[in-house]
Amino acid sequence: MDALDEAARERTRELLLDVVGVSLMGSRQESSRSVVAAALALGGTGAACVIGTGQRTSAPWAALANGTVAHAVELDDVTTESSLHPGVAVIPAAVALAQQLQSPPSRLMEAIVAGYELTMRVGNALNPASAYARGFHPTGVAGVFGAASAAAHLLGLDVDQRARALGIAGTMASGSLEYLADGSWTKRLNAGWAGHAGISAAYLARAGFVGPLSVFEGRLGVLHAYSDASLPDRLLADLGQPLQVMRVSIKPYACCRYNHGLIDCMLQLRPEVAVGDVERIRLGVLSGGALLVADPIEQKRQPVGIVDAQFSAPYAAAAALVFGTGDISAYAADRLADPAVRRLMAVTDCYRDADLDAEYPRKWPAAAEVHLKDGRVLASRVEFATGEPENPVSREALVAKFVSLAERADAEALAERLLKLDSAADLGVLTDVLT
């Protein structure tokens, strides 16, 4: 960590705290029980904690369980340009392997920085809108490289071994978007699989297994296989200016990041709106995210389950108006069935606007209009959603989020200890939290 400036160290501590918090809440979700059971059955004995169970298994299988668990409530960190979730792919893998190797906390933090750097750079180069159009989830595709990079750092691989580990990771890169068809849980698994595969790739490279050195730019490499409009120059552009951990957004809302600006718009308008007076709603969505949250509009107006709601712009807007929040409390079965929410979704349309798309993916603006029965039209536009680096959540809000998700009497004290992890003698506080 000595090679990192204080801003990068501070941000890495915050990102770790955030992922641990969402993991604790995620461990209580229905989807987590099955993945944890499978990981414990397959992983055998080991030193890596499986979150929320008090049990341990081998690092690759703990990474699978914990990464999936961490992505279960759609509250984990996210990025703009690469449009992915780096933390849930990198941090569970790095923590699991660090526990297995008994690495010092400072080494773990370095590995996390390395993992975010590669995940986000590969995501930038994929061009997220193109990857989405091909049916791929950038978190799964790019996250395996970040997890492999973090694992390689913890294992102390040399330069050639690290390059080979990335080549091996390329054949494990995956992540289908077909969960959008029926609200399945596989989006969550994409993060866990990335961590599992990344650790496996690093171990294979250490053992001498050979992967292609042209894994990214080669004729059949990842940037061609997973995207029709990749941007290879983004892999190495602006190295260290700043480090990618400085470009990560913290999520205040428990849904797809493409809905966050829309929620901010609706919360701005809410003091002027009586829900019963709304005639219709128009939402300006980014073309790059329309596939996820706006199309087909008939399906997005009638979400069946929680995953459907998390990926519905009409639900995000309606819930924000009715309940005054987009946090995890808005994504519960009773709220999904609320009659006022259902009525508002039925009169919501989504539109695309070249002005909104002008700077995508480096900037994600959003716009909304509420048409009232008396003829008035209330409009709002947000340039930077809450939680983005340009509009960050405060340290106090970050700790409050952790406390609310952890649901432990000692949560605030644990948060303070996690925020000083890199100066600790060992990973004891992580073990305390995760078990």
Image (cartoon, helix red, strand yellow):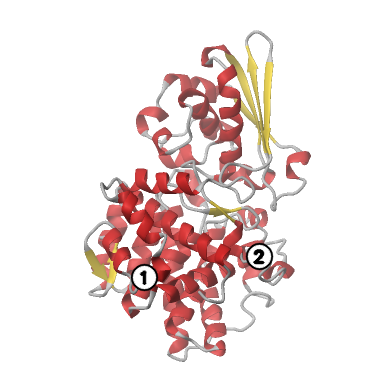
- Name the residue located 42 percent from the left edge and 77 percent from the top edge: 200
Amino acid found under the numbered disc labelled 2: Pro
Of the pair 293 and 122, the residue shown nearer to us: 122
Residue 367, x across and y down, in percent: 67, 33
Residue 125, x across and y down, in percent: 67, 65
Residue 364 numbered tag: none
Determine which residue is flagged by label 2: 242
Q: Is residue 69 visible?
A: no
The reply, left or right, for residue 201 in relation to residue 101 is right
Q: CA distance from mark 2 to mark 1?
A: 26 Å
Residue 316, x across and y down, in percent: 52, 33
Amino acid found under the numbered disc labelled 1: Ala
Mark 1 neighbour density, 10 Å: few (under 14) some (14–19) many (20 or more) = some
Of the pair 186 and 13, the residue shown nearer to us: 13
Q: Secondary structure at mark 2?
A: loop
Against 262, is 66 above or below? below
Q: Secondary structure at mark 1?
A: loop
Against 90, is 414 above or below? above
Q: Is residue 222 visible?
A: yes
Against 207, is 152 above or below? above
Mark 2 neighbour density, 10 Å: few (under 14) some (14–19) many (20 or more) = few
The residue mark sitting in front, 2 or 1, is 1
Determine which residue is flagged by label 1: 424
Labels 2 and 1 touching (C-beta < 8 A): no
The reply, left or right, for residue 167 in relation to residue 228 is left
- Name the residue located 71 percent from the left edge and 49 percent from the top edge: 360
State which quadrant residue 430 falls in: bottom left
Residue 139, x across and y down, in percent: 53, 59
User: Which residue reaches farthest bottom?
Assistant: 208
Q: Quadrant of the C terminus?
A: bottom left
- Name the residue located 36 percent from the left edge and 70 percent from the top edge: 424
- Name the residue located 52 percent from the left edge and 87 percent from the top edge: 161
